[in-house]
Amino acid sequence: MTDTLHPALLPNGLSDGLPPRAEREADVVDGLMAFVRAFGYRRVKPPLIEFEDGLLTGAGGALVRDTFRVMDPVSQRMMGVRPDFTVQIGRIATTRLRHDPRPLRLCYAGQVLRVRGTQLRPERQFTQVGAELIGADGPAAEAEVVVLAAEALEAVGVVDATIDLNLPTLLGVLCEAHAVPDAVRAALRPAVDHKDVAAVREAAAETPALGALLVALIQATGPAREALAEIAALDLPAEAAARVAALGALVDRVEVAHPGLTLTVDALESRGFEYYTGVGFSVFARGARGELARGGRYRAGPEDRGEPAAGFTLMMDAVLDAIPEVEATRRVLAPLDHDRAAAARLRQDGWVVVQALDETADPAAEARRLGCDSVLGAAGPEALASA
């Protein structure tokens, strides 16, 4: 005898989107896309699956472990299901849109699928919305995407968001300056990621100056101005100091463009920023699991013809958790032979009009059964009496 799975059982990390949350997500996605398009970002729609040669090259190399891979029965070539949109947008920009004027502003919305979830985000399939600014270098481009991410979230109801800024490449720059062997770098990375001061000192035992510097950078985490002041007092190598200065210039621009936005700095944070080449940032908000958004500076397209780019991705599961519940749309039951013109006017005014499919002796009971709060009468919607 073989075990029969219940038809509603799904693999770990996968779930059905049900009303009203699925409807709410669709409405919020539409609002976000309308907002970013008003800033000149044009929508693109890459395929869910494509050849792995294109999906996992360049910046996509950092996504290999997250990618479902299958054999294409037509071409007999390996394909990958996208775990993230950014690499696909880079491919489109540097191939099909390579002749379009720069900077190129593109946006997207859709589903991604990953091999495994995380502790904070166990879902393996979820919706992403994002925007990419391709072919522009410098702090103005970075400031645009940081502010756009914050303002897009505000537009759909997220309040009290915090933007955490970081320099994902800073540890590598410091290791280069101190001529740290690869084995030591491999030990330092997880220690720094976990903010384990003792492990950092142990891994950097042969370069105590680097160990002390890393500990100081770990401790210089918090509100942007305070953290930058602490970092400025450190004796950083020239290249590291230049990157910190660029971060400070970005903070200046963001504060001018969006006064009052809460900015923090965690200079050494790099988890999730494997393909970023400059400033990175995450967005957090009260009530949401993990980060609402992630973005920053990277190279778009294959390594041999990549372009400077900056962008952000919104994680819709977390975004929905951070948005206050909205008042439910009013629902009215329209009898079988109702006034269709009146029903159309109600729909234009934002009502949901549910049409009865047969005669009923008790329209009020039928309306309640179908989740309606009114019945359409000759003079318009008639509210149901309290049960």
Image: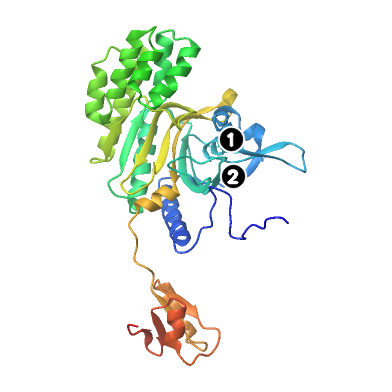
Q: Residue furthest bottom?
A: 361
Label 1 belongs to which residue?
A: 91
Label 2 belongs to which residue?
A: 46
Please say if 193 is above or below 23: above
The reply to whether residue 22 is in sight is yes
Q: Quadrant of residue 113?
A: top right
Q: Residues within 10 Å of mark 1 (few under 14, many from 20)?
A: many
Question: Do the numbered discs 1 and 2 sit on residues whose CB atoms are within 8 Å?
Answer: yes
Q: Quadrant of residue 99?
A: top right
Where residue 355 appears, x then y in whole percent?
51, 81
Please say if 101 is above or below 211: below
Q: Quadrant of the N terminus?
A: bottom right
Give the residue type that dot 2 points to. Answer: Pro
Q: Residue at x 36, y 84 (%)?
A: 384
The residue nearer to you, when weighing 169 against 202, is 202
Q: Secondary structure at mark 2?
A: loop
Please say if 10 is above or below 196: below
Q: Residue furthest front?
A: 1
Q: Quadrant of the C terminus?
A: bottom left
Q: Residues within 10 Å of mark 2 (few under 14, many from 20)?
A: some
The reply to whether residue 245 is in sight is no
Q: Residue at x 65, y 35 (%)?
A: 52
The residue nearer to you, when weighing 81 against 313, is 81
The residue nearer to you, when weighing 155 against 213, is 213
Q: Secondary structure at mark 1?
A: helix
Real-space CA distance between mark 1 and mark 2, rounded to the nearest whole angstrom: 10 Å
Give the residue type that dot 1 points to. Answer: Arg
Q: Residue at x 35, y 34 (%)?
A: 143
Q: Earlier in the sequence, mark 1 or mark 2?
A: 2
Q: Is residue 119 left or right of residue 237?
A: right
Where residue 15 appears, x then y in whole percent?
53, 54
